[in-house]
Image: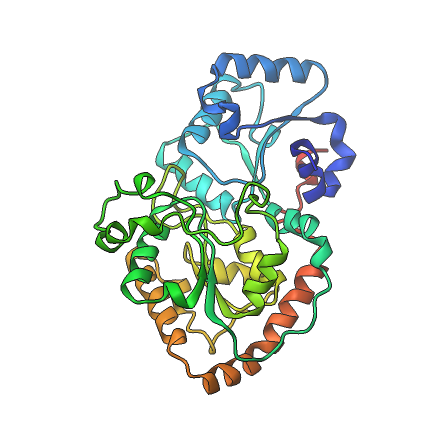
Amino acid sequence: MTEDQLVFLIWPELENYKDKIYQLYPGPENNFSLRDTDEIVQEIILARQLGKTKIVFSNLSEVFLPAMLTKFNEIAEALDNVVGEHDMFYATNSFNGEAVYNMFAEKHNWKNRITILAGHCIQYSSQCNWYKYKSLPSYEVKIKDKMFVCFNRVPRLHRIKLLEFMLGNGLLDKSYYSFISTYDSINKVPFNIPLITQNKNLLPIKLNIDETINSPTMIYNDDLTYHNNSYFSLVTETMFYQDHWIKECSMLTEKIFRPIMLQHPFVVLGNCGLLAELQNLGYKTFSPFIDETYDTIQNDNDRFAAVVQETERLCAFTNEQWIEWQTSIKEIVEFNKRHYNLITDHRVTKNIEQYFE
């Protein structure tokens, strides 16, 4: 699927207004934030002259970058009295995108606003990408080779900190663990990493990633082995500490949908509220079999500590405890897999036809 198709796949009701819609793609690969504002304004004016009265900035796999929102405001100000709030839209994968945008706009006293369209685009795209794994055997209760699986590709701060913890607690050998970065790419972080430094020759840590298997959004046959032979997933989501985006933005990515698809219980190292959003979507999570109070903790360091504490607790189980635990969560993972396959509505923002009529 192409970027210009995604808006109509997430909001199929917009097909009726396709002739009115003009899409722009503000992703970083398009250098949108660096484009001349007058050039973008002229592009929009020309599109409106051709009958495209609704402008959609489509970035459905991502969240917000401050420079991007600032550019939207510059455009809205330049088009004041020409294009209204419900004539320009930003389509995002951030499920709390409307609240975050309004907070950012209020903070900067913006008079001219745009309308946010939030959708679970990655839930949709993962369904499309993983269709051949739609039918899997029932969850098997058994003694497994490893405690957990944890994939780490981009070296974000919380993933580096987690690797330091893993080395200090002897958990690396108990897991299917990847960390696809060299020491030279991570050695300038705002905290000490003495154990990573001592073990820098271990990096990068690879599982099945090579020149032919390199897409983090796909499922490969080896992934079935990793999940079938471990008890749970430790999911390091994209967002945790402050980075180049607006930290308060939250999204669900393929990282959390992979264990759902593969019938694997999970602990999530990510923004607070991710489990609550999964529940809003109709999924079940794993309390009381997993202590999920971490999902409510606002402070990043405290949430990190709660996640690793729960990981340690689970990894201390005996074989007998693991059998009992798997028996308890079997119904949940099988329900989630069925529910994932049945979801067809990926909209967060609904009732939007009023803006396009």
Residue placed most toward the observer, 204 or 158: 204
Q: Position of residue 356 (x, y in %)?
A: 69, 33
Residue placed most toward the observer, 122 or 320: 320
Q: Quadrant of the N terminus?
A: top right
Residue extending farthest to the front is 201
Q: Quadrant of the C terminus?
A: top right
Q: Quadrant of residue 162?
A: bottom left
Residue 137 position (above or below residue 46): below
Q: Residue at x 36, y 32 (%)?
A: 108
Q: Position of residue 280 (x, y in %)?
A: 57, 61
Residue placed most toward the observer, 41 or 131: 131
Q: Residue at x 65, y 46 (%)?
A: 125
Residue 292 position (above or below residue 118): below
Q: Is residue 243 at all visible to an observer of this figure?
A: yes
Image check: 233 left or right of 296? right
Image check: 26 left or right of 167? right
Q: Residue at x 53, y 24 (%)?
A: 30
Residue placed most toward the observer, 342 or 38: 342
Total count of labels: 0
Q: Position of residue 224 (x, y in %)?
A: 61, 62
Q: Position of residue 40 (x, y in %)?
A: 54, 17
Q: Is residue 348 at all visible to an observer of this figure?
A: no
Give the colouring mode of the picture. Answer: rainbow
Residue 30 position (above or below residue 280): above
Residue 299 position (above or below residue 350): below
Q: Residue at x 58, y 22 (%)?
A: 83
